[in-house]
Image (cartoon, rainbow, N blue to C red):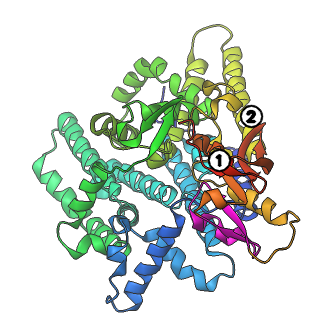
Amino acid sequence: MNFAFNLRCPTDSVRWLMRLFWLGLLIWVALTFRQHGISNDEYVQHTYGQMLLDWYQSGFKDQDAFHYRNLYLYGGLFDIVAAALDPYIPIMIWDIRHLLSALFGLLGFYGVARFAHLLGGERLALLAMTLLFLTVSWSGTMFTHTKDVPFATCMLWALYATALVARDMEQVSGRVIVLLGFAVGGALGLRVGGAFAVIYLVLLVILRVLLDHRQYRTPLLSRLLRMVVVLLPAAVLAFVFMAMCWPWSVIEADNLLEAAKSFSHFDFNMQTIANGVVYNISEVPRSYLFQYLMVKLPEAALLGLCGVPLLWLAGQLAWRKADQATRMPMATLLVGILFPLIFVMDDRPALYNGVRHFTFLLPLLTIFAAWAIVAVWRALANTTLQGRCVYQAIWAGVIGGLMLVNLVDIVQLHPYQYVRLNRLAGDQTHAQFKWEGDYWSSALRAATDQLTEMPLPAREKPYWVAACVDTPQMEPYLDGRFAVTRRWDQADFFLSTTNMHCHEVMKGKLIGGVQRQGMWLAVIKDRRQLQGDDRLATPAKN
């Protein structure tokens, strides 16, 4: 069994399917990017981007960005670009941000295609891209997760460049060095967690040097020093790009360390839920991320990953037979998957919103799952068992059936497909309250549109609206008849998503909302007739 699964001479049909896939992605983004609501952190992130832009435009005199909440601990690559585009694109800034985030998501699809092609050609690339689209924590979040998806995309391209460096070593091309520099700098220019990309690079280069030394008796120290020289331009480029996107990180020598320390002990008073158990975000179990991966990854991807242990012996044999250039891309992929998982198990960082903070794992897991699916297919083709064609047909049918079920769910849930749980979580209508759902209140945009379309009696004072979100998430979509209030007991209407039972905090007559697959994702409650204690808030079930 060929370890890399290189599928040579790709057919014209695969190439046409790839083109159709890309055409579908572009049309989907163009038609849907304005359907998503403002996420919880988006207002402050955009404000931070404007402040960074002011810093540049003031000749580095305006220092407000370096004192704004805790945003200075983050890089501003995405936010400063969005703020710079705002005056030139005649649509709402929030839609600009969602389109820009979606473009990063598309760049992630392309990165998956390139990495998968490195491992197994165009067929594997198409399968990996399909699995990524079916991964709702990517395709359903790539419009609104304006920090997580761009960061994940930069990390993916950094790992791809690392795979090429580890494969080619001293012969690596200048284009790869430039790609590596921009990708690592971009990742650091979004989050200090981009340091993972540097760790991956160091580990893989050392691994390649050790493997070559063991097999060919090549020198250790001198080769490592040569690689330092080879990679120095990438390091300089990454540092400069990071500094441009995140100037606070280089103003003082220890700022990067301060940011890293802050995120390793990041905590505030907030709750999350996993499989029906509510936790403070600093007290989640080590299994939290794994639990969410189990219910958020596509069923087909999980089935492919379950086949990996069955391929262990064959994989060992293939590893021994493969040369270093073939081994290193797969080794790079495994390091990119395993290192963050080991980090979570060991460090136990504060986690919430499911897999959101580890979105950068999702493209890698879909590549590996696609590789495993192809590996099982190849193993069945090479078996000596009778009826192997039947086994291959069964395998393909099961994978295809699971993917079709996944796709139907996405269509029915659109544009809120990121709330989807796979069948391991059980019936979605019952499981939705056991896991985080629409945690960034995307459905409230449609709910707000419903409210503004309702015929209401004219009056001089506004109708007061309370919502289980931050005020800036609501105000852009309300007309002049409404005003948002923080005094919920005085509210005429209450809007909320159903995430973490927030819709049950306030009483009122249900007059509208957003439903998908029999589930209420957001509700509109009329409170105008309530009196006395019925107007007061009550704690959620959590």
Observer-nearest of 321 and 487: 487
Say which residue appears at 17% left-offset and 70% top-offset.
253
* Disc number for residue 533: 1
Q: At numbered mark 1, what does the secondary structure look like: helix, strand or loop?
A: helix
Of labels 1 and 2, earlier in sequence is 2
Q: Is 316 on the left-hand or right-hand side of 99?
A: left
* As drawn, 66 above or below 534: below
Residue 59 at x, y percent in the picture: 34, 92
Residue 449 at x, y percent in the picture: 78, 63
Number of other residues with Cα within 10 Å of mark 2, as a class: few under 14, some 14 to 19, many 20 or more:
some
Q: Quadrant of residue 296?
A: top right
Observer-nearest of 305 and 45: 45
Q: Is 341 on the left-hand or right-hand side of 512?
A: left
Say which residue appears at 56% left-offset and 23% top-offset.
376
Q: Residue furthest front?
A: 532
Q: Is 48 on the left-hand or right-hand side of 213?
A: right
* Disc number for residue 502: none
Q: Is residue 381 magenta?
A: no
From which residue to which does the magenta span run? 462-485
Say which residue appears at 65% left-offset and 55% top-offset.
442
Number of other residues with Cα within 10 Å of mark 1, as a class: few under 14, some 14 to 19, many 20 or more:
few
* Disc number for residue 404: 2
Q: Quadrant of residue 377?
A: top right
Q: Quadrant of residue 539?
A: top right
Label 1 or label 2, whichever lies nearer to me, is 1
* As drawn, 121 above or below 443: above
Q: Is residue 466 magenta?
A: yes
Disc 1 residue type?
Asp
